[in-house]
Amino acid sequence: MADLHLVVDRAAGGVAAQIARELREAVRRGRLAAGVRLPASRELARDLGLSRGVVVEAYEQLVAEGFLISRIGAGTVVAPAAGRPAALPVPPGGPDGPEGPSRTPEDPPRAGSRTAEARGAEREREPYHGRRSTAPDLGAFPRERWLASMRRTLAALPAEALDYGDPGGVPALREELAAYLRRVRAADVSPDNLVIVGGVAQGISLTIQALAGRLPRGRSPHDLGWFVRRASRPAPPPGRIRLAVEDPAGGRQLPLLHAAGADLVAVPVDGEGVDVGALAATGARAVLLTPAHQYPTGVVLSPRRRAELIEWAAATGAAILEDDYDAEFRFDRDPVGCLQGLAADRVILIGSVSKSLAPGLRLGWVAAPPEIAESLRLARGELDLGSPVLEQYVLADFVTTGGYDRHLRRMRREYRARRDAFALALGEHLPEITVRGVSAGLHLLAELPYGWDEAAVAETAQDCGLAVEPVGPMRHAPGPPALVMGFARLPARRADATIRALADALRRRPAP
Amino acid sequence: MADLHLVVDRAAGGVAAQIARELREAVRRGRLAAGVRLPASRELARDLGLSRGVVVEAYEQLVAEGFLISRIGAGTVVAPAAGRPAALPVPPGGPDGPEGPSRTPEDPPRAGSRTAEARGAEREREPYHGRRSTAPDLGAFPRERWLASMRRTLAALPAEALDYGDPGGVPALREELAAYLRRVRAADVSPDNLVIVGGVAQGISLTIQALAGRLPRGRSPHDLGWFVRRASRPAPPPGRIRLAVEDPAGGRQLPLLHAAGADLVAVPVDGEGVDVGALAATGARAVLLTPAHQYPTGVVLSPRRRAELIEWAAATGAAILEDDYDAEFRFDRDPVGCLQGLAADRVILIGSVSKSLAPGLRLGWVAAPPEIAESLRLARGELDLGSPVLEQYVLADFVTTGGYDRHLRRMRREYRARRDAFALALGEHLPEITVRGVSAGLHLLAELPYGWDEAAVAETAQDCGLAVEPVGPMRHAPGPPALVMGFARLPARRADATIRALADALRRRPAP
């Protein structure tokens, strides 16, 4: 039985999160080795003078994140894959646990609410055209606060900062984001192995190019003679890599994956997430996953599968690309930590502000093992010289001043209400449809009864103003007809009428 | 002799620019065919009731742009390459000639001047560290006006606009920039064949990839099964293209060119620009040029060479990549129109705001024949989904409201004064150095006496706070020792003291 040496500050609140953080660190630093059995929750609660529920909550969180394993009759033990020492140091005072104390303690004053209301009224007049089922509510973009961050940035920034930036990203932003990802996503990341990219798409493209051996590994010379002499030599064929993708998977990324050098194999997703046995059988050297909220099924990767995945990657030397898709919006409990926090040497974490703020900002990040991170940085130096710097500074300010946390909290409440209203309305007006994947994210999976025509239903739903996409083209292996339905742009009070209209339209034009 | 049908509005002013514009259009639209002889300037001036100087000015401008050729004894005739019909229509009311009327007729009120002065004082305290010899004065970035454009943009933008944008660029910006490039650069461009990119580097990289056959030519399917089936097929080797570059040429772009698929050949630059005869002998399928102000020699491509280049491209089907480097800053006369305006079917014009505003904005453009423009657009859809949208709207606002023109006018005056002071100080304190390439741009070429050690002199100059680079590594064929010296960040009043300090330091440590 482990002696845990837990230090808990009751006065600070969030005691379960404190315990989870301490245990997570202990596992990462090797103080709690793989297989070590933890005290029973009742026991530890008594030792700490806390209620048992608090300890259970902390254990559950770490089981969900894959740090601990809970087996009936065997108690709670440290997961095998989690025991390896972390490849990257976590600075002291790092993770604060999800939803830790934000730096500005209170919500914004009500001064801006009239403007927000006025804008809300304006939005009502716009037609509800969600082009993608995954899109956030862009009407909620925090324009005043973003502008305020821009004002502060332009007032304070030294002139030098407007020059060509570090192609790997502005240091101030990398620092803020690394701290944020440690705190909220339990990521194992420092500013040095975090690279700023122009969104998840570019992050995935460059990562695959790195894995396929297409990116530079060192600085090239800047000498004209060298390149002229080199021109006569035959160029080697471009590297490719066998990459597993989830089946079903979103279609928009596929051309990008292929162009970056990936030969795709498809691995089925079931109710726990990707099938790791099937994955191992493909011989893939890398896998692209959406563990926080699978697209399109909405499945959250189970603790068991998380552990299996990491074991597979460790045993085969394969890489896991973790598209941290929809991670900010988990409704029924705290967000689960990312896979990358469990195995920073094998997992590449890729995220962006596209769902949390707006896709049009084209700001994202890649947390990767140092040699891959450096490869991405060099590659951008030979491609586009990095992302625009001004909005990197603005985002850093927005995170530092607590604006990002506050916006996420507000949107999480709002999206939860929209999800509830949407799912309720579906249950009431279209009981034939089975709703899945609602515990997180901005979309759900609507499984249609056998025989319904996906494409026809999708078209009808789009005519009703809904953001939906048929799942058929996203599948390799056949599956039941289904739609991805986005609910983020549909105000809760309009959900019932909109879904009723869809139900009416479907009954008028019955699916074959 | 051509009947010109010129319509001149004397009341509007800028009569020479009006005549130049009308003649340019007449040549483009084929009303004035290649070889047609124009009336003598004296004759035309009499017909129009204008002074002869005005007509001469218009003719000279068009000779410099390559539309006309002037030969002793043969008068002024339409250039052979310019006679082909333009591939792209120029909308009515297009080019206004360089420095045409800006949309806000007056310079800004003095309200902001205190802030500007305060910032100026601050700048004085900063050490003068130009990292690149080509860098603009970043302390002059128009922060207040940029913020004002951001405020207007955020107030007016519909929520939809924050979604994924057109990967080829926000339409509003493409429209503004196309109008600007027609007006100021005499480019032959419409919003449809203009693609927004993340700076010149990305523009060149993608263009070479397009020419090398590496970019998609149509939309790929979004179907998982299609890609899984395709994975087993062997991938074709990546295309490469023989690309000529100027000798000497800046070294920083070379790795980028190679990575994009270019096999480099070097073609000498003389006092008129690139040697077209030598270029033709290389068998290159494309050439990358800086016609407005060659880097590093500072040579402006001569009218004769412009015509030869276009003839070479037309005869061989080769492409000309025109890096419109430093084009905004021509001091001794109006900017010469770009090559692309002469042959829009063979020239790809690539520019950015890196010299005019700041490199950190990472905003640039490519004007290309439609199939290449579309290829770039598709490629960004499979790479990074386009540039951030917010600052595209901000730049569009900045151009529309006249802020861009105003800023350029102000900087042109400022840089001219800095160049004058810099060149004067060099002549006075270092008469051994021959100064070249001063008619435009933010740098000059300083040829050192035979036997001086470039690298040592460069180091001494850097120690004196100057932004200089040795030319040696930029050469393929050997040449005299020389430095690129940037003057944009050195205030005119400090030029004399700085150069004197350099001269003193060099005499203390004499070049071998």
Image (cartoon, coloured by chain):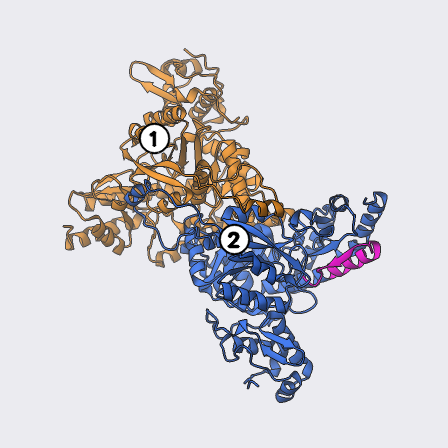
Chain colours: A blue, B orange
Q: Are marks 1 and 2 on the same chain?
A: no
Provide residue A225's location: percent of width, then percent of height.
28, 43
User: Considering depth in this image, is B437 or A351 the residue closer to the camera?
Assistant: A351
Query: Tag 1: residue type?
Result: Gly
Query: Tag 2: residue type?
Result: Arg
Q: Secondary structure at mark 2?
A: strand
Provide residue B273's location: percent of width, then percent of height.
30, 32
Output the chain of dot 2: A
- Tag 1 residue: B283
Provide residue B291's location: percent of width, then percent of height.
36, 34
- Does the stretch in magenta take in A420? yes
- Does the stretch in magenta take in A288? no
Q: Quadrant of the N terminus of chain B?
A: top left
Output the chain of dot 1: B
Number of numbered callouts drawn? 2
User: Considering depth in this image, is A472 or B114 the residue closer to the camera?
Assistant: A472
Q: Is residue B408 visible?
A: yes
Q: Secondary structure at mark 1?
A: loop
- Quarter assignment of residue B334: top left
Q: What are the residue bounds of the magenta stretch?
A: A417-440
Q: Is residue B140 above or below residue B80?
A: below
Q: CA distance from mark 1 to mark 2?
A: 38 Å
Label 2 Cα crowd, 10 Å radius (few <14 / some 14-19 / many 20+): many
Q: In front of the other: label 1 or label 2?
A: 2
User: Considering depth in this image, is B6 or A292 the residue closer to the camera?
Assistant: A292
In-image side of A133 versus B405 (left or right): right
- Tag 2 residue: A242
- Quarter assignment of residue A81: bottom right
Provide residue B503's location: percent of width, then percent of height.
19, 50
